[in-house]
């Protein structure tokens, strides 16, 4: 990754972020904090790195959104193992999208492991492309700015961010799961009272 950014500059950042969206094992935390390190060295500008990372992420998100939108559930289920999506995941995502579509896309872009996958159910649920683009770009730009800024601030110690983000993302994920359980319990109680 370091050689890619060193050789290709902003194009390298954009390309790595596009690949990160399509192949989640490439961690955005590593790419973005490394880009921040290059900003601290003066090899990249902060605004340019942020724009390149956001455009690369958005292009990758469009590919996954398009797969969900054009191929629908059958395509996603056929290649679900490759995309790491099960039918139960898709059913759950559809329910969330019908109730909270915009927030799911925006907040999903801030959660490692969910960042790229959130694009698939957005496409399957036929979220309007303009809305998807705005929410994805907003959430992605926020995530990118935070991590590029952290890498810039830490300079030579940029790799420390990766471990910290992993710990923080686990906490955020636990809070999100607790909120989801709370909402489900609340819905179930309301349904029981009405029924």
Image (tube, rainbow, N blue to C red):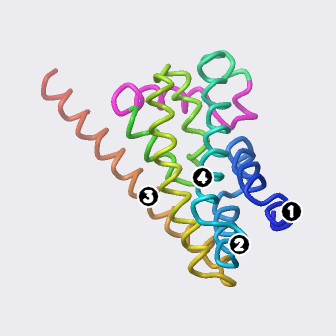
| Image-based side of 135 in relation to 42, left or right | left
| Image-based side of 36 in relation to 100, left or right | right
Extent of the magenta region:
79-100
Mark 3, residue position: 174
Mark 4, residue position: 51
Residue at 49% over, 67% down: 168
* Residue 59 position (above or below residue 28): above
Mark 2, residue position: 38
Residue at 76% over, 52% down: 11
Label 2 vs 3, first from the N-terminus: 2
The x and y percentages for residue 76 are 66, 23
Nearer to the camera, 135 or 112: 135
Question: For the residues marked 1 and 3, what is the alpha-carbon distance in whole angstroms?
Answer: 39 Å
Residue at 77% over, 60% down: 9
Nearer to the camera, 42 or 138: 42
Q: Can residue 166 be seen in this view?
A: no
């Amino acid at each position: 990754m370091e050689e890619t950014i060193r050789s290709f500059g902003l194009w390298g950042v954009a390309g790595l972020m596009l690949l990160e969206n399509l192949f989640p094992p490439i961690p955005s935390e590593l790419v973005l904090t490394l880009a921040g390190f290059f900003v601290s060295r003066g090899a990249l500008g902060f605004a340019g790195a942020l724009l390149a990372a956001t455009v690369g992420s958005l292009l990758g998100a469009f590919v996954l959104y398009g797969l969900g939108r054009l191929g629908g559930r059958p395509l996603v289920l056929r290649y679900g193992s490759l995309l790491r999506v099960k039918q139960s995941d898709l059913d759950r995502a559809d329910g969330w999208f019908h109730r909270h579509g915009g927030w799911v896309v925006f907040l999903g872009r801030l959660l490692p492991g969910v960042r790229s996958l959130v694009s698939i159910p957005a496409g399957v649920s036929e979220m309007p492309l303009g809305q998807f683009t705005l929410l994805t770009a907003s959430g992605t730009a926020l995530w990118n700015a935070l991590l590029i800024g952290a890498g810039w601030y830490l300079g030579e110690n940029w790799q420390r961010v990766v471990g910290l983000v992993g710990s923080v993302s686990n906490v955020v994920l636990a809070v999100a799961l607790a909120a989801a359980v709370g909402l489900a319990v609340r819905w179930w109680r309301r349904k029981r009272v009405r029924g």
